[in-house]
Image: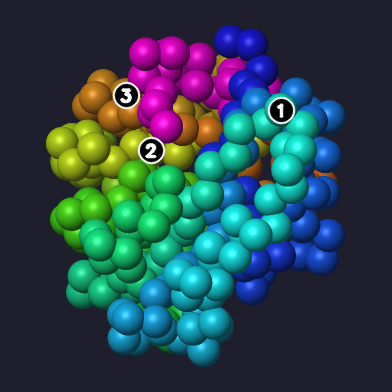
Amino acid sequence: MKAIDWDLHVHTIISSCGKEGASVENILEAAEKLGLKTIGFSDHCWAREIPGASPWHKPQDVEHVLKIKEMLPKDTRGIRILVGCETECIGNSVVGLNRELAENFDFVWLPANHFHQRGFVVPPNLGEGGPKAVSELLYSRFLEAVDLGFGSGIVHPFIPLGFLDWEEDILGGISDAQYETCFRAAASAGLAIEINGYTAENKTRLAENGFSSLYLNMHSIARECGCKFFFGSDAHHPSEMKGYQAMANFAEACGIGESNFLVV
């Protein structure tokens, strides 16, 4: 597969975690050099109308995230721009947006695995249960995200953020049958699955073609279940906009072709 020319998961200085230099202009300059034709801005968002935001999330409400539209230059260098967001899912069906508020965006990404946010997204003592506890929560949180009834896709699926030292054991603890349950539900709900830059670059448990067998298997099951896919670097700075050929090659290795991609 030729190198991809779209990235639907890019953060800017609008996000609290956006790095200095992650301005719209700098991102578009980088995109032009990389030959990208579409950029999807995906800054973090927790609406002020939804209770339960952490102090970190609270300033990033809908109005704040939509300020990016005021930052868009008249000349976008021929690059198509989509303004979406990445909200937050913290379990028990608590999420930083709802169906009505989601209409403000071109797309809404749902993260079901921000487990590095201990004490907010996950209990602070989750690690005491070992890899099995993390596997079980990743599985249940994915299904919770699907059941929300809105959103465009799931970002960085099943990557055990906050517990990467246990990555092989955690992902190995999720059965193919469980993945099938999750991805059939996602396909039925119309939620696309991200092919993330980390996934494509990951070298844990190498398969013969150089990709992680863990993530190859997962995404292949998602394809078999009828899911649509999208590419996302999850860049927080223009220098992190990379890995596009690796993502394209990863998709090809999973049997994911043009007919399997999300249309936005």
Q: Quadrant of residue 183?
A: top left
- Say if 49 sits above or below 190 in the image: below
Tell me the quarter of the image containing the C terminus: top left
Distance (Cα) linking label 3 and label 2: 9 Å
| Image position of 109 (left or right of 135) | right
x and y percentages locating residue 16 in the rendered image? 64, 73
Q: Amino acid at mark 2?
A: Ile
> Can I make out residue 194 in this image?
yes
Q: Amino acid at mark 1?
A: Gly
Q: Main secondary structure of the magenta part?
A: helix
Q: Is residue 249 magenta?
A: yes
Residue closest to the eye, 122 or 32: 32
Distance (Cα) linking label 1 and label 3: 32 Å
Residue at disc 2, secondary structure: strand
Q: Amino acid at mark 3?
A: Arg
Distance (Cα) linking label 1 and label 2: 27 Å
The residue singled out by tag 1 in the image is 78
In this view, the mark in front (3 or 2): 2
In this view, the mark in front (1 or 3): 1
Residue interval drawn in magenta: 244-264
> Can I make out residue 169 in this image?
no
- Say if 22 sits above or below 126 in the image: above
The residue singled out by tag 3 in the image is 223
x and y percentages locating residue 248 in the rendered image? 58, 21
Q: Earlier in the sequence, mark 1 or mark 3?
A: 1
